[in-house]
Image (spheres, grey):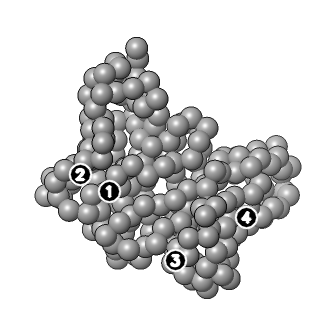
Amino acid sequence: GQSLEQPSEVTAVEGAIVQINCTYQTSGFYGLSWYQQHDGGAPTFLSYNALDGLEETGRFSSFLSRSDSYGYLLLQELQMKDSASYFCAVRDPTNAGKSTFGDGTTLTVKP
Amino acid sequence: NAGVTQTPKFRILKIGQSMTLQCAQDMNHNYMYWYRQDPGMGLKLIYYSVGAGITDKGEVPNGYNVSRSTTEDFPLRLELAAPSQTSVYFCASTSGGSSTDTQYFGPGTRLTVL
């Protein structure tokens, strides 16, 4: 099976940098994905790490270490609009499309 | 491209009623998913499909049924609605390749069972 753990809440101030961690126990996976969800909205894709290392997309970066069963999402130059929930997710290659999400981290950005 | 569409957006059901949540995508994606999200919680996989005619159970399939007769459509059927099925339901799709894993989500259906 697949299980992913994330901190439930993180708080940071505008302009700061915040890291949201995701540790996982899986029997294998294609890669680690990150999604953002604003209150009342649908999840939207942010980033995907197929290989170990850092992927950068503007203010957002994501990191994966398969040997440590660990990944993180790094948000830089925080803005108020970054206040949202963030989810890590994996798909199981031994079970075709089966997808598992973490329980999510609620990020609150304060002025 | 409309992406992933879901209908209805909101629905109130009485206990024991049935309904079908509609989901359609126009991106020719093979993989489609149904999730439920309870308040303050993560996404729980109900059912998924890797192509037309192929469906499989996810983490929380009890009380639900699905079908996938075409690539585009993936309806979710609730039989004998119960208060425990009050939730927000999201449909999603992806191409299914291993080099990318972007799931595209519909806007969701907010269901209340009273």
Tell me residue B24's x, y (percent).
66, 67
Q: State the CA–CA distance, disc 3 to disc 1.
A: 19 Å
List the single residue furthest toward the left: A67
Identify the residue position indicated by label 2 in the image: A55
Circle 4 packing at 10 Å, graded few (<14), some (14-19), many (20+), is: some
Most foreground residue, B88 or A56: A56
- Name the residue rendered at 33%, 45% in the picture: A5
N-term-proximal mark, 4 vs 3? 4
- Residue A75 vs residue B71: left or right? left
What's the residue type where badge 3 is placed?
Asn
Tell me residue A51's x, y (percent).
20, 62
What's the residue type where badge 2 is placed?
Glu
Q: Secondary structure at mark 1?
A: strand
N-term-proximal mark, 2 vs 1? 1
Identify the residue position indicated by label 3 in the image: B30
- Asked which quadrant contains residue A8, the reply is top left
Label drawn at residue B22? 4
Q: State the CA–CA distance, disc 4 to disc 2.
A: 35 Å
Identify the residue position indicated by label 1 in the image: A48
Q: State the CA–CA distance, disc 4 to disc 1.
A: 28 Å
Q: Secondary structure at mark 4?
A: strand
**Do marks 2 and 1 share a chain?**
yes
What's the residue type where badge 4 is placed?
Gln
Chain letter of disc 4 in the image: B
Q: Are marks 3 and 1 in contact (CB under 8 Å)?
A: no
Q: State the CA–CA distance, disc 3 to disc 2.
A: 26 Å
Tell me residue A70's x, y (percent).
22, 50
**Do marks 4 and 2 share a chain?**
no
Circle 1 packing at 10 Å, graded few (<14), some (14-19), many (20+), is: many
